[in-house]
């Protein structure tokens, strides 16, 4: 039962909550121990919140997951975890997270609550709306980034929020494309909204968002406002890592038929993992060393 609950919480997906730390890094606060402690606490809170959301989603989708070649093995769909235990886990994780969030600040609590409500609405209704489904996923990442800024009381950079939005859209659209190709004629049985998409339509959307991600990040690194705020004009040296990462992910989507789980790709694909590590190192070098 314990291992089933751990699987139910999807600890691997906690990597997504690293977005909460973005404000700490790009606000130049990563050398401040007090701010680091607060940012880490905020990240842990969002990890617990996201686990409560994942369990809720699995609870609602248990019948559809039984038709998925991979998701049918999830604890609730496979019967390893009962519905009552799942409900208790959802309520406990959500309550602990929100109480801890209120201890950081009232503003952070509001953002955390908004994140929880948005994802609950996604699990219940928003995931059934074409385009609205991927937009909802993207906004949940924006809320993570915004919460990171609120937690350490720094202004939420519009550049950070926009970059987060477009990158999350890119990943969400890639996931939809992977689901359609993987499930083929069974796609509708697993997720009805997939009937409203096609590989061609998703490729068009991915093309637009891909350009947006790259251009937005380039504008961010070359912005005079950002250079003055961070006291450096060298952030542009991180651009090649972002471009390579995006192109590598496109390669995996189109040639390797991957992309169903961005977290799994990050962990399993060595080139992308190395690229992300080098990008992080280059950002820290530019902001805190050079």
Image (cartoon, grey):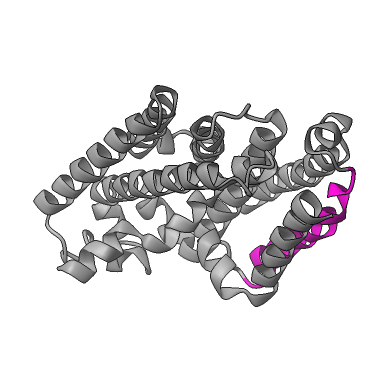
Q: In this view of the protein, can residue 66 be seen by the observer?
A: no
> Going by the image, does 93 lie left or right of 208?
left
Quarter location, residue 6:
bottom left
Quarter location, residue 220:
top right
Q: Nearer the viewer, residue 144 or 171?
A: 144
The span shown in magenta is: 233-256
Q: Position of residue 238 (x, y in %)?
A: 81, 55
Q: In this view of the protein, can residue 90 be seen by the observer?
A: yes
- The answer to if 182 sits in the magenta stretch is no
Q: How many callouts does the rendering have? A: 0
Q: Residue at x 79, y 60 (%)?
A: 241
Q: Residue at x 81, y 53 (%)?
A: 286
Q: Nearer the viewer, residue 129 or 285?
A: 285
Quadrant position of the N terminus in the picture: bottom left
Q: Residue at x 79, y 32 (%)?
A: 229
> Going by the image, does 212 lie left or right of 185?
right
Q: Position of residue 63 (x, y in %)?
A: 24, 54
Quarter location, residue 174:
bottom right
Quadrant position of the C terminus in the picture: bottom right
Q: Is residue 218 above or below residue 250?
A: above
């Amino acid at each position: 039962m314990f291992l089933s609950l751990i699987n139910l919480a999807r600890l691997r997906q906690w990597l997504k909550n690293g977005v909460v730390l973005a404000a700490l890094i790009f606000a130049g606060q990563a050398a401040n121990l007090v701010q680091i402690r607060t940012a880490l606490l905020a990240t842990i809170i969002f990890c617990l919140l996201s686990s409560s959301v994942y369990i809720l989603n699995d609870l609602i989708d248990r019948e559809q997951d039984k038709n998925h070649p991979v998701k049918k093995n999830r604890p609730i769909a496979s019967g390893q975890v009962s519905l009552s235990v799942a409900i208790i886990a959802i309520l406990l994780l959500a309550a602990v997270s929100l109480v801890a969030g209120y201890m950081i600040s009232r503003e952070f609590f509001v953002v955390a609550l908004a994140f929880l409500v948005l994802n609950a609405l996604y699990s219940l209704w928003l995931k059934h709306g074409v385009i609205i489904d991927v937009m909802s996923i993207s906004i949940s990442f924006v809320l993570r980034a915004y919460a990171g800024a609120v937690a350490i009381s720094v202004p939420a950079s519009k550049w950070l929020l926009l970059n987060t939005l477009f990158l999350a859209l890119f990943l969400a659209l890639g996931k939809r494309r992977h689901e359609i190709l993987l499930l083929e004629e069974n796609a509708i049985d697993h997720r009805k909204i997939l009937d409203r998409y096609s590989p061609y339509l998703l490729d068009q959307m991915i093309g637009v968002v891909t350009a947006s991600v790259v251009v937005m990040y380039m504008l961010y690194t070359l912005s005079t406002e950002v250079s003055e705020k961070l006291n450096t004009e060298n952030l542009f040296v991180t651009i090649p890592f972002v471009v390579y990462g995006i192109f590598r992910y496109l390669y995996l989507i189109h040639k390797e038929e991957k992309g169903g789980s961005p977290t799994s790709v990050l962990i399993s694909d060595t080139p992308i993992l190395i690229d992300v590590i080098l990008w992080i190192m280059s950002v820290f070098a530019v902001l805190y060393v050079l």
